[in-house]
């Protein structure tokens, strides 16, 4: 079931304490999300992008997937990503050496992008979400850092480009496969598993109940501003 919405700015509470206000990641329209029932989702009135989902599985699925994704990301960086063989020569690529290779080839901006967008930001996003999901899931009091974590998590979600990286890798592989023999390594499968787990975790990261849990610690002066309608 889908609910349509109206307008505000950044992620924050609404004044009546029900629902949250977010900027659509696709079109930047400012949206006031009403309280959702279990299994419902809210979509942007402008572009139709999904803004929030009330998970039928509760916070447990998001937490489990986030924890498992951290393990998979670590494995992806420890093990070889893939091996290329052409004309009797083999070359092994790993995610940990890929930025170094790019840097040595005079592409420091690509090296930095790979490290930030495929490792640092997604890992930080998962760790931030875990830091609020654990106390929330086990019925503890909201920690003082929870408000800041929720806002950083919201902003980082714009810069975690796991899905873009996966599509880029798959598109590159379809071209390389005609030039060389490719053997996919443990690192490749670990990263793909990480990507799926991270996306499932984010899909089920249910923000409205988290904000309602944090509410006693949030003061009006700390809220994001710019409510416009
Ligand atoms: Zn939109």
Image: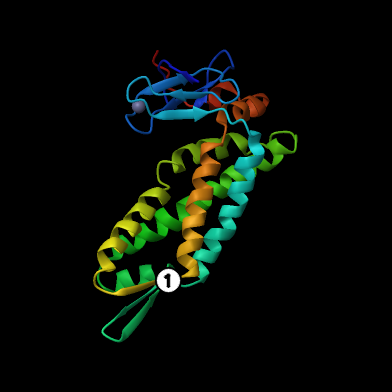
Whether 179 is drawn above or below 40: the answer is below
Q: Position of residue 204 (x, y in %)?
A: 56, 36
Q: Is residue 195 visible to the viewer in this orientation of the structure?
A: yes
Q: Quadrant of the C terminus?
A: top left
Residue occupying the point 43% across, 47% down = 160
User: What residue would you read off at disc 1?
Assistant: 94
Report the side of 61 relative to 157 (left or right). right
Q: Secondary structure at mark 1?
A: loop
Residue occupying the point 32% across, 55% down = 168
Point out the quarter of the image occupied by ligand 1.
Answer: top left
- Confirm if mark 1 falls within 8 A of ligand 1: no
* Image colouring: rainbow
Residue occupying the point 27% across, 67% down = 176
Whether 135 is drawn above or below 46: the answer is below
Report the side of 159 relative to 218 (left or right). left
Whether 155 is drawn above or below 78: the answer is above
Report the side of 19 relative to 90 (left or right). right
Residue occupying the point 50% across, 68% down = 186
Report crowding for label 1: few under 14, some 14 to 19, many 20 or more residues within 10 A (C-alpha). some
Res 184 quadrant in image:
bottom left
Q: Is residue 217 visible to the viewer in this orientation of the structure?
A: no
Whether 194 is drawn above or below 143: the answer is below
Res 36 quadrant in image:
top right
Q: Position of residue 189 (x, y in %)?
A: 48, 62
Q: Position of residue 200 (x, y in %)?
A: 53, 43
The one nearer the camera, 121 or 38, is 38
Q: Position of residue 201 (x, y in %)?
A: 55, 43
Report the side of 94 relative to 27 (left or right). right
């Amino acid at each position: 079931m889908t609910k349509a919405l109206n307008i505000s700015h950044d992620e924050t509470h609404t004044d009546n304490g029900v629902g949250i206000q977010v900027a659509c990641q696709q079109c930047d329209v400012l949206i006031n999300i009403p309280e959702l029932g279990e299994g419902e989702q809210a979509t942007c009135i402008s572009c139709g992008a999904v803004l929030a989902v009330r998970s039928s599985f509760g916070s447990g699925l998001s937490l489990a997937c986030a924890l498992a994704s951290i393990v998979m990301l670590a494995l992806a960086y420890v093990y070889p990503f893939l091996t290329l063989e052409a004309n009797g020569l083999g070359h092994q690529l790993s995610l940990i050496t890929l930025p170094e290779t790019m840097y040595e080839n005079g592409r420091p901006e690509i090296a930095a992008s790979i490290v930030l967008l495929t490792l640092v930001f997604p890992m930080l996003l998962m760790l931030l979400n875990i830091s609020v999901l654990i106390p929330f899931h086990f019925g503890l009091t909201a920690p003082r850092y929870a408000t800041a974590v929720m806002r950083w998590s919201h902003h980082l979600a714009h810069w975690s480009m796991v899905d873009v990286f996966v599509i880029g890798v798959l598109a590159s592989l379809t071209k390389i496969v005609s030039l060389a023999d490719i053997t996919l390594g443990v690192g490749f499968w670990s990263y793909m598993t990480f990507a799926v787990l991270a996306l499932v975790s984010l899909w089920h990261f249910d923000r409205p109940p988290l904000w309602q849990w944090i509410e006693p610690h949030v003061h009006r002066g700390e809220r994001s501003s710019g409510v416009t309608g």
